[in-house]
Structures are given as structure tokens and as C-alpha cells.
Amino acid sequence: MQRATLQRCAAAGTASPRAAFEARLSPVTRVKRSSVNLFQLLNFPGDFSIGCFDSSVFHRLDSANLARGARHLKPVVELDSITSFLEDDLRRVEQLLREGVRSADTLIPEVGEHTFASGGKRIRPVLVLLTARLCGYRGLRALQIAAAAEYLHSASLLHDDVVDGASERRGRPSVNAQFGERLAILVGDFMYARGCQMLVEDGSIDILSIYAEALRQMTEGEVLQLSKCFDPDVTESVYLDVIGRKTASLLSAAAESGAILGGVTRAERRNVREYGWELGLAFQLVDDALDYVGTGAELGKPPLQDLSEGKVTLPLLSVLKRCSVGEREGIVSILKSCSREGSRVDPSQASQVAECVARHQGVEITFARASQRAAEARARIESFVDSQAKQTLLDLTEFVVQRNR
């Protein structure tokens, strides 16, 4: 009965979740006294009312938030552009990554090459390099710590893909799909060991300690997320705890390690650490929104993958509190049925849930929350002296909420 209700609601609208989201963002002529293009709204001062949002949350929305929420459709800030002055340092970090997977066993370099050749944003190394410069350090230690941070991140992805049974990563077969689960786990272990080895070689107990704490939190976050799969009663505080541990903790450690290299005051170090934490929350919020509206080509993995795995993220979580009783019962029925049967949410069920999320603006709400977290990140470093590194860190918060992958 409940599923039938959800199906009837889904049938009432013919647009896909992505199309529905785009349709609500496109009528710029509804902006009071303005007919500017959507992507000019970043420079449009003040608040405005927009009729295409029927939720009170979005009745009054500042222009920057709307534009940032739309940026997943056409990113304006490009990571390569804003970090171009780090090109030489990032090339050296990349060299360290490739050298670090050399081993007497030929399989480890092969899997390592597969992992690093697929690219990636390298946000964690970028954070180390930028915060070190922000705090006055330009030495070689930043390169090694940046590489270590990326090793720890890459190791976590290898293990996550095994846990999730993922078949794609960054548009290529995942390591577990290409080489098997056992090798994915073992090479993940190797990368954890290599990252820790590089941190030990650096010699800073402070830096080693913050990364050890981040690894603990990342593991706890993944376990907590696993325990809450298919649970429609997950609270927002639990969700934020999960994404804080599994994503924000490592970005926070990367940011703080750069500050430690710079030898700044305790208060400045705290501000940089909190910048990384807020940036990490914004990053994961956008990831969770893109699962509902991104394409396979943009995401490098199938859309609705998190939903199919039973992950109740903010787009769905916010809608479960706002949708009709019938819609909620339909979604709960799907989640509980999959939990009992130990199966994934099938594509037709996932589409029904995604259409409900689109109708109730779950994606827009999530992008707005990401924007708020990005603003918090910017506030944490405002007191630092103006510099290219500071401006790039500010720009990085824009990239995080505007990206489409």
C-alpha cells in the first residue's frame, strides 16, 4: 500500500530528479526586478524572493546561496585554475606518490598506478600546501606530509569500495572490480603503512598524532554509517557525526598539519583546523547531493549509488521529515524491505525515492547547508594576513560547493 502511494506520487511528475532540480533553478525571470542570468547572480547584491521554491526555507534565499546550489550544473571555480601556482609542488607530490608504491611485488605498483592514474582532486595535499604557506612555511616537509595525506585517503577509498561493493571509481573500474577484493584490501593496507611511514620519517609527533586521530575517526565513521544503512530513523546529528568522522576528520588533519609546519599560535592552529573541518562537511554534503542529481559521467560512478546501498544522507533525511505520511511510509517500506532481505535498493525503487527527494527540494536544502558550512570555513581564516594562499583557501570553499563531481 505504502509503495503504491509512493508510485502514484512519482507518476504525477514526469521529469527526472535532475530535470526537476534544474527546472526549479532556471526561471530567473521570477527574481524580483531582475532578469539576470542565473550565473550572474553571484554578483547580485542583497536578498531576493523566488517563486519557484515553495518551501519557507527557500522563500527568501540570498543570491550567493542560490547560485552555489546551482553550480553543480556548471562549475565556475575550477580547481586547476585556483591552484595553478602550486603546480610544481603538486607535481613533486605526485612523484612521491608514484615512487612510494614501488615494491618487490609487481602487483603493488600495478594497483598503485591504477589508483593514482585515475586522477582525483588531490584536495588533501592541496590543503597541506596551502595552509603551510598561509602560516609562513614553504619547505620540503610540506611535500612529504601532503603525499602522506593522499596515501591515507587513497587507502580509505580502496577499503570503502570493498565494503560498498563498488564497481567504479572516478570513471574507471574500481580496484576491487579490476584486481579482486583481497588485493584491494592488501594494497589499501600497504598505502596506510606507506602514509604512516612518511609521517614517522617527518619526525613531528604532533603531526603524526593528528593523522592517527583522523584515521581512528574515519574508521569509526565508516562503521557508524554501516550500522545505520537502511535506517529511516537516522537523525541529522548522527548523519553529521558520520560525515564529520569519515570525511571532515582527514581534511581537518591535512589543514592543521600545514599550520603546525608554520609554527603559528595555538589559536591560529585551531582556526585552520576548524577551516578544514567545515570544508570537509561542505564537501561531503555536496557529494551526497550529487548522488541524486549528478550523471554517471560527472560522478565517475553510477548515480543513486549511495541510495542503492541504503545510505540515508541529508537529501533523503530532510525529505523524510517534510513529505506526506504516505510518501514517508513508501520510502520506509522500501528501506526496511531491503534491510530484511539483505539486498540493495533496486533502480526502480531508487528512482521513486529520488523523485520524492526532488519534489521536496532535498537536494536544494543540502546544497544550502553546504554553502553555510563553506561560509563557516571562510570565517575561520579571515583573521589571517591577506596572501595568495589565503585567497586560494577562500576560493577552495567556492569550488567545493560549485563542483559537479
Image (cartoon, helix red, strand yellow):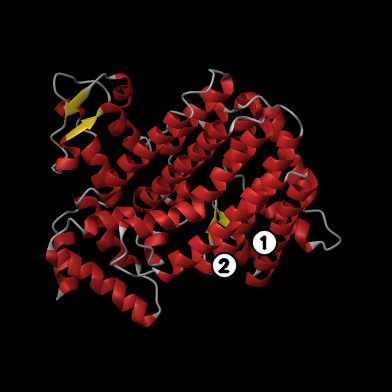
Give the spatial CA distance, label 1 vs label 2.
10 Å
Q: Which residue is mark 1?
A: 188
Please report contact status of discs 1 and 2: CB closer than 8 Å, yes or no: yes
The residue type indicated by label 1 comes to Gly
Q: Which residue is mark 2?
A: 162
Instruction: Work out whether 282 lies above or below 38.
Output: below
Q: Residue furthest front?
A: 266
Q: Secondary structure at mark 2?
A: helix
Question: Quick one: label 2, few (<14), some, or many (20+) residues within 10 Å?
Answer: some
Q: Quadrant of residue 22?
A: top left
From this viewpoint, is residue 161 visible?
Answer: yes
Residue at 28% across, 67% down: 233
Sequence order check: which comes first, mark 1 or mark 2? Answer: 2
Residue at 43% across, 41% down: 404
Q: Secondary structure at mark 1?
A: helix
Instruction: Work out whether 66 lies above or below 223.
Output: above
